[in-house]
Image (cartoon, rainbow, N blue to C red):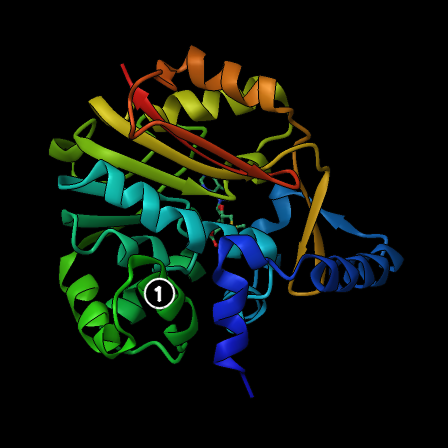
Amino acid sequence: MVNVFDIEVQARPDVFKQKEQENSVLQEKEEIEKNETIYDRTSFMTTFSTDAYLEDFYTKVEDPAMQMVLKFLPLIACRIGSIDRLLDFGAGPTIHVAATFRDYAKELHLADYLPQNREELIAWKENRSRFDWSTPLKMILTQEGSAWEQLQEMITRTRNKVHGIYHCDCFQNPSVDCPSHLHGTFDVIVTIFCVEYCCNSYEEYKNAIKNIAGQIKSGGHFIMGGILEETWCSFGGRKFTCLYITKEMMLEALKEAGLELLENDKTCNFYEINGMFMICARRI
Ligand SMILES: C[S@@+](CC[C@H](N)C(=O)[O-])C[C@H]1O[C@@H](n2cnc3c(N)ncnc32)[C@H](O)[C@@H]1O
């Protein structure tokens, strides 16, 4: 049984239940380290379980990285304000990014590489999904200062604004298979825990960021969440490779892609907690 009050406490910036979580993350790491297999991107197609991913990260939302996103994304969205078109690039089977921008964007677009994830997104859009998004969505409502009674309205509004669900591939240019008139027209692209899991080298990482950034219109925003200085991550009881990058490498990759953290621009931000980061930069 989920203790919703507990989750609310976790969602607050000042009272992250750090120690307790560190212990459980350590325990999980020890368990997973016993299983020597580390899957790379070539096995994504067959080893990524959509159901296990949702279950692991979005039922109780105990993972500090996911909590960070749910905590900071509503603040970033509020600062950016009204926009025409948003794309969640590498959305996986998730809709929390779309829900966060439901009141700001006229159109929400979702893209993922894996067919099983796109199928889940389509099922959600068509109200066929069995996954219950209440916990993460209530955390977003709390961050906004909105009442939980608005949950159903939040879901309906998000659903109605989802205009398209596409295949994407950060190694291709164009990186998203949306209708061609949409290419390069996104005011905001969000990509969370995606790029470092797909790339095997820094060259690939820089190229992937360029390909994603190429879909943002000039002056638009690039929001990325990721992990610094890690070589693997785990979900669904399996280990996946993760490219080791430092903050400096990440910032250099953004710069080369024409993305700047502008000074005196209140929409540009960088947050980092224990190697997890969120950045909002502008395409110049
Ligand atoms: C860890 S999941 C993140 C999902 C979601 N953004 C979230 O925050 O929960 C990583 C995602 O990257 C996607 N992915 C894998 N290879 C990709 C590629 N070449 N281009 C774009 N996305 C890719 C996977 O399908 C998966 O959904």
Image-quadrant location for residue 125: bottom left
Secondary element at image label 1: helix
Could you tell me residue 88's position as x and y percent?
Answer: 33, 45
Image-quadrant location for residue 256: top left
Left/right placement of residue 204 relative to residue 268 reads: right
| Quarter of the figure that contains the C terminus | top left
| Residue positioned 20% across, 33% down in the render | 187
| Quarter of the figure that contains the N terminus | bottom right
| Relative height, residue 161 to residue 253 (above, below) | below
Outermost residue, bottom side: 1
Image-quadrant location for residue 241: top right
| Relative height, residue 74 to residue 277 (above, below) | below
| Relative height, residue 222 to residue 93 (above, below) | above
Could you tell me residue 29's position as x and y percent?
Answer: 79, 56
Q: Is residue 173 visible?
A: no
Could you tell me residue 171's position as x and y percent?
Answer: 45, 28
Would you call the spot at circle 1 few (<14 residues within 10 Å), some (14-19), or many (20 or more)?
A: some
Left/right placement of residue 21 relative to residue 156 reads: right
- Mark 1 residue type: Thr
In this orientation, which residue lies closer to the viewer: 42 or 146? 146
Outermost residue, front side: 14
Left/right placement of residue 34 relative to residue 63 reads: right
Residue underneath mark 1: 142
| Residue positioned 33% across, 50% down in the render | 74
Q: Is residue 256 visible?
A: yes
| Residue positioned 18% across, 41% down in the render | 81
Disc 1 residue: CB within 8 Å of ligand 1: no
Could you tell me residue 109's position as x and y percent?
Answer: 23, 48
In this orientation, which residue lies closer to the viewer: 196 or 135? 135
- Tally the marks: 1
